[in-house]
Each structure stands twice: as C-alpha cells, then as structure tokens.
Amino acid sequence: MSSGIISKGARQLVDELQGGSLEASKVFETYRKRINELTKLNAFITSLEYKPNARKEGSLYGLPLAIKDNISTEGIRTTCASLMLKDYMPPYDATAVAKLKAAGVSILGKTNMDEFGMGSSGENSAFGPTRNPWDIERVPGGSSSGSAVAVSARLSPAALGTDTGGSIRAPASFTGTVGFKPSYGYVSRYGLIAYANSLEQIGVIARTVDDAALIFGVIRGKDRFDSTSTDAKPVSSNTGRLFSGGHFKGALLPQLSDLVSKDVREAFDSSVAKLDSEGIEFAEERVEELELALKSYYVVACCEATTNLARYDGVRYGPVADPSRDWKSAISESRTMFGKEVKARIMLGSYMLSSGYYEEYYLKALYIRRNLKLRLLKLSESYDFIYTPTMPVLPWKIGEMIDDPLQVYLSDALTVIANLTGAPAISIPIALKKGLPVGGQLQGRYGLDDRLLELAATISGLLKFRGEPSI
Amino acid sequence: MIGLEVHVQMVSLKSKLFCACPTDYRGKPPNTNICPICTGLPGALPVLNIKAVEEGLKIALALHAEPSTASYFFRKSYFYPDLPKNFQITQYDKAGGVPLAHDGHYTLKNGKTIRIERIHMEEDPGRIYYEGGRGESRFSLVDYNRSGIALVEIVTSPDFTEPEEAREFLELLQKNLDEIGINVSEYEGSVRCDANISYAGGERVEVKNISGATEVEKALRYESVRQRNMATRGVKVRRETRSWDERRRITISSRSKEVEAEYRYMPEEDLPPVSLNQTIIKNIALNMRGSFEDRYRVCSKYGVGEEAAKRLAGDPALYTLFMSITGANEMDASRVGNVLANEFAFVVKKHNNPSLSGDTSSLENIIRAYIRNGDRSRFISAAHSWVSGIPVRAEEYKPKVDIDTLIDETLEKEMKNIGNLEGKRRLDYLMGQILKVSSQLNRKELYIKLQKKLEGLG
C-alpha cells in the first residue's frame, strides 16, 4: 500500500483523496516515513509532522508538498540554507504558500538549497550538500536541490522551487524530474526571500508536466502584495492533449553547442531526431545577443543580491553583535556568517554598483538584457519554442568543482536566458546517459505559459522517457 | 550662499509609502505600528501608495515645478541601524532616474525668487533611541513605527543669502502646504531640513536634521558667524557635515565629508514605473484646495479672461464646477470658464443660495450646447432649471414671460368683466387671471405693476 502511494503523481493522489479511496493523514505519514528513512540525501532542512488542513473542499485537499527553504512559511523556520537565518521564523506566509494552504495542501517540510539560491549544484548549503538519488556521490543540481531530490526520490509528490538563473530547471535536469519556471510575474514573489528580484520566480518541480501544471494553476495570478505580478487566464487543467502532427516548430541554437558535453549532446541530438520524425519541425537560429547573456546575468544577479542581502547585519537576524564594538566592525563581524559564494557575490555586486563602475558593468548588462529580450521576442514570432539541453553537462561529483567556480557558472549558460527575458521555461527528462538523467529545455513566449505546458506535455509523451532512481 | 533640502513628512496620508500601516505613529508604544514591509522582513515587497504620488505632485505644482513623465524608484544603499533593509527606497536624478518634479521656483516677500532644483519622494527611516543620551548609553534601541512614512524632499538652489530668508521660505512653504491640504503644522517635526551653507569662498558645510523654520534660522545664523570668524582668523572652512544641537544652540561636527558618499544607487525593480500623464497632473492641479491666487492662476492657465478668472477664483462653488467640468474634458476650458463666470453666474444670482451640487455632466452638456449653438435664451432657461434642481430639458423650458405685455393682454381681454368690480376686488380678480396664465411670476412685482396700471386707467 505505502509503495503504492509514493508511486502516484500529484494529480492521481488528489483524485483518489477526493474520491475517498485515500486518506490525507495516510498519504502524509507514508511520505514522512520515507523522508525519515532517506535522510542521507539531505533533501530537507526542516521536516514537519502531520497537521490536517481544514480546507476539505480545496482543489488540492490532502496533497502533501515540499517547499524550498527560501519561501516564507508562517511559524515554520525558513533558513535559506544560511547560518544568518538559521533561527528565522517568518510571521507570515508567502502568497504562493497561502494559496496552497487554502487549496488544502499540507506541508511536508522545507527543502535544502544553495545558500540564498546562489549555486547550481546544491553544494553551497550551511546544512551540508544535497545528494543526487541517482548517484549519491553526485550533485543534484541547484539551487532548488532539496525540492528536486524530494520529487525524484519520491519523498514528496511535487515541490515548490525558485528559479533565478536556472535554479528549478538545473536540478530537475540532474534528477530526472520536470522543472517549470513560469513567466516573470505569473506567480507572486511576496514571501520569496530575495536573491535577485528582477530575475527570480517561484515555480514547480514535479514528476510530470501535468502535475506541474496542476500546482502552477493554484499558485499563479496577480497579487496585490507584489506589484510585478500579473493576471493571467487559468491554466488548462488537461495538458496531456495528444499531439496530432505538424503544428509545432522549434528553434535550435547551435552556437551554444560548444559548451555542451559529448554525452549530453548525443542525448539531445537523438531527442531532436525523434521529435523530428514525429513531425515537429526544427530550424537552427543564430542569436548574436546570446554571446554576452551569461555575463550580463551574473552582473545583474550580483548587483541585486548586494542590496537584497544588505539587511542581514546582525541587528535582527544572525548572531548578535558584540555590543562593545562599534557599529561598523560589529556588522562586518556578523556578515562573516555568510557562506563563501554568498560573500563573493555580495562583494562583486558592491563593486559593480560603485560610482565609475555602475555604467561600465550594471548599465551595460541592462542594455544587453534588453536587446536579448527584444531579439528573442522577435524569434518567438516564428517559433513555438526554443529547444536546448537544460544543463550542458552530466551531474558532477560532490566537491569536484569546488575550486572552479567559473566552470560552475558556465553550466548556467543555457538556463539564464529565460530569467533575463522573463519568458517561461521548462526542463523535462529526455534520456539517461551513463545511468544519469539528461534534461531538455523548452523556452516559450512571455505570458504563454499554458501553451508551453501543453507543448511540454506533448513532447514528453513523444519522447516516452520513463525512469526512476532505484533508491 | 545657502541652499536647503526640506523633508516634508506626508502625515496627511492615511498609510505609509509602501504598506498599509497608518501614519499616526506619534505617541504609539515602540514597534507597534509596523508590518513585514516597513520592517523589511525577508521576502516582503513594497507596494506604492499612489495617493502619496498625488500628494507629492500637489507639492510640486504649488512650487511651480515641472512633473516628470513617469515616477520610479531607486535603492540607495547605506548601512544604518534605523534603516531596516540597509537601503532606502528613494528617487534619483542620475543613472537614468528622474525626480518626481524639477525646476520650480518660489517667491519671497521681498520679491526674490528661490529656484527649486528637484522634488522627490522617499521612505522615512525608523528612529534610534539612546538610553540616557547619545554617548552615555551602552546600547541603542530602534523604533520602526516611523519607518516607511512617505517623505517629499524639496531641494532648493543655493539662492538664499541670509538666514532669515531661509526661515521665511520655510514658513511660507508650511503655510502653503497647509492650504493645499498637507497638514504639516499640526505635527511636530513633520518638516525637517538639511542646510548647506558656505561663506566668503569657503567650502560647503552641511548642517543636518534641523527641525522647523525658527531652528533653521538659528542654526544658519550660528554657522554664518562661525564660518566668518574662521575666515577672519585665516582658517580655511573645510567641507564637512555638522549637526544642530537645539539645546546648546551650536552646530557640532559629525563627520568630515571629503569624498562623495558611495550610495551604490540602483533601480528598484520591485516597483514598476508609474506613468504621470498630463490628464493625471491636470486633475491634481484642478482639485487642489488652493488659495485665491492658486485658483486664479489655474483659471488663467486655461485661458479664462482676467475678470472671469477673478470671479471663478473668488467663488469656491463656481470654481469647483469649473474644475469638475474641465477636469473631465479640457476642450474649450477657457470658454467654459467664461460662461460659468458670466451667464451662469447671472442665473445663480436669481436663486436664493442654491447648492450647485447637481449632476455636473448634465450642466456640462448645457454649457457645451450653448458654446456650440450660441442660443442664449435656451441656455438661460436650462441653467435655471439645473440650478433649481428641476429636471427640465432645455427645449421644454418656455421663455420668460414679460409682465407688462401680460398685463396689457389680460386687461384688454377682461375689460368687460371688470366694469362692475372696484378697487381691491378688481385688482385681486386680475391677479388671479394673470397667474392662471403664468404661475411663476413674481407676485409682488406683478401686484405693484398692476396697481400702477389700474391707477393710470382711473
């Protein structure tokens, strides 16, 4: 029975819970037991006991979900995987969490991540690295590492993640799950603890596109607490519509293929061949504006991070400063609590925003970003989607890249594009290589999230990838 | 040379600049007037209080400043314990930013013009308390009740030469702000000021955080004496920041400011730009509760003639009608104003203190029809019925009856019937007959005229 429950996707669970053949507490306890059995994956920072949700009429009643630990949960510690917030208890729920609770969801726990979302591997956590269930010596990808691992290892039917430069899609790709980053503004960021506020979005990691769409349908929409949020039509609940041939056209970006390893390229090329044989048309495009995309991403992200993280000064969060010290040295002392990667990005951002460098770095990055946005918007008039691998490489070994941060930054080259443009993007598992999952990324047109989800469901159906880690 | 940076606390607003917390923080226990947004909790986002922008624009218009075409915000980064996010959300005039308004001016009593460089909005920080006083206290306490209150900063050019001019400017400004509904005088410390002062070629000294007009004059007087004394002794005045000690009546050096402070300004991406189009700005201008001069200026600006503008500005009810009619549609604003001040005012005078609170859109139709077809009598009758609240369509209103003609006609017709009536009975009979024809006549006027006529007949 219990193995039956964990093998069910979110939609199936909801259907059976509503039909009365499953009980909410039973589902929750089954997952909770498995979370406790698999602590070696280090997917959760905080796991919770069952708390019944009174919203029995809610559309997701009884569904347990995992939430990334940078999304505020009232009365549940929210750490951002940082020592600075290790005891921080938010007094309010993020809008996305409030919507899930109102729909009847019970929270399984808060998932591990790269500190404040800064990282692509899941290694930069004050609570230790998250491990990949396909090979526990390898990284699961980040920064939403715990959320992806929880879904992949069946510790949760689905999970909320956040995506600033690929933080949902990268771990989805490395763990063989579906990771969906909605259009910027389609999910309220209220309560999402900011790293780079003009780039990041809350999104979903799930086992299938249909499950991701189900949860996205609940959390989406305009929120009066987030001025950048926008209204959108409700998602079509049935995204598994069968593709009937000949309508879709995808753009390929061969200029990025130098970055892509042989293994990933083989898996990706064979998926293109398969989709082509099923009637999806592909054409190659050269996008000059992509050349500086990764650089402009890191400039914008670091500049925003330096202001967003300025509030952690030891006055209200983090270790209490020694009151006998003067103000400046006391807060400098407090801020040594940040991890290495966080400190590096804060310092880079501070430097690039200083007078004299602002124009040279930040304004240039904004300019590149704007041009890229316009170019890809134009491209999306001729294509339904842009198709690339999600990650250019297979999951690496934990610690392997620790001294080579630039190599890790390079692994974001394919995912940051959608954060710069604000377009929706989704990673779906397409193949296994050397026993490790490879993800394919579909980027859509801004605001056409529903269409992208339908397309992704169709393409998933055509590629017929099936696989679960044996853990 | 003296220049001022005046911070006006927008206590007339109900809520803070970026959250729903109330603005009446004064007298509340520490940290009880707060929420996740104004304490900068992780994940909280600012949401612009659009009323604050409107009030800021009122100030800008009162200072004859030019509003920007859009309003957007920047982050100004500096670490200070009273600043919950360690950046202040403010507006910036460099790096692609614009202030709320720029290039205004203000005239002092002596006729001197003070140029206003820019007007921008920002959030007020919290307050620090030093138990037992600064320097004595082993720790400092922070109260965030004030954090996030909207401030409007007014930056003048260094156009003042005397401390009393700075005081006069602030006094006039406060009076003016009160007049346009931004009640600053009621709240202590709601107008704060930084003053930049330099004498005799010395470098600029900034005196921070002076509260109110009288203190500004005192602080500047002290500083001018201090700087002149230094010059006489041959000591060069260096660029620095000082603070004004109200109790001891001296300025104290707080930090030397040899280099421009590094604020690492960047756009606030959590607040999308708000477009300030001409319609919004004009509606604000028209709805300002201004003085006679303000109202006169608005009328002249829209091309209303001098006499008519005076009449509109001097009659709040007429002015309000002018504002609401032209506010909705600025076409023909000058002609609408002239009709209101002349023909319409003439009609209003015939009624006994009418409320003039009827449906302005139907009055607008009546006025615009008149402007189109020039049919004065139809306009007058329609205006009468609008003022008296009778919903009569313009064409249904009959032209006013001429009393003398009516009397003559009635006499001719009734001559044979009044032969055997005498004196008062004859008068009453004729009154009754005439009023049967037209009931709306002024009875007293009719009585007197009829009496005269009958006397003449003998």
Image: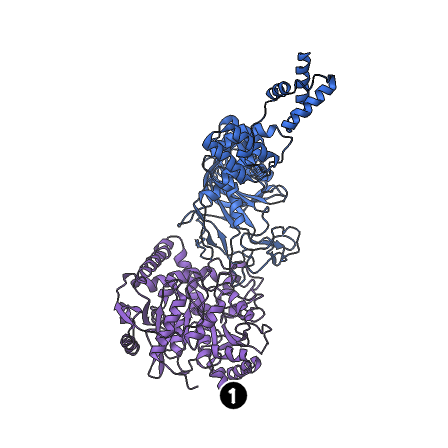
Chain colours: A purple, B blue
Chain of the residue displaying label 1 = A
Give the class, few, some or many, for how many residues have Cα within 10 Å of label 1's Cα (few <14, many ≥20). Answer: few
Q: Residue furthest front?
A: B416
Q: What amino acid type should be assigned to the residue bearing mark 1?
A: Met
Residue A408 image point, x, y percent: 36, 71
Q: Up-down: is B86 above or below B255? A: below
Q: Nearer the viewer, residue A40 or A144?
A: A144
Tell me the residue that label 1 is attached to: A1
Q: Up-down: is B59 above or below A246? A: above
* Element on which disc 1 rests: loop
Q: Nearer the viewer, residue A305 or B64?
A: B64
Q: Is residue A187 visible?
A: yes
Give the total number of marks visible in the rendering: 1
**Quadrant placement of the C terminus of chain B:** top right
- Image quadrant in which you'd find residue A268: bottom left
Left or right relative to A64: residue A290: left
- The residue located at (50%, 43%) in the rendering is B57
- The residue located at (47%, 65%) in the rendering is A220
Q: Up-down: is A176 above or below B78? A: below
Residue B169 image point, x, y percent: 54, 35
Q: Nearer the viewer, residue A280 or A324?
A: A280
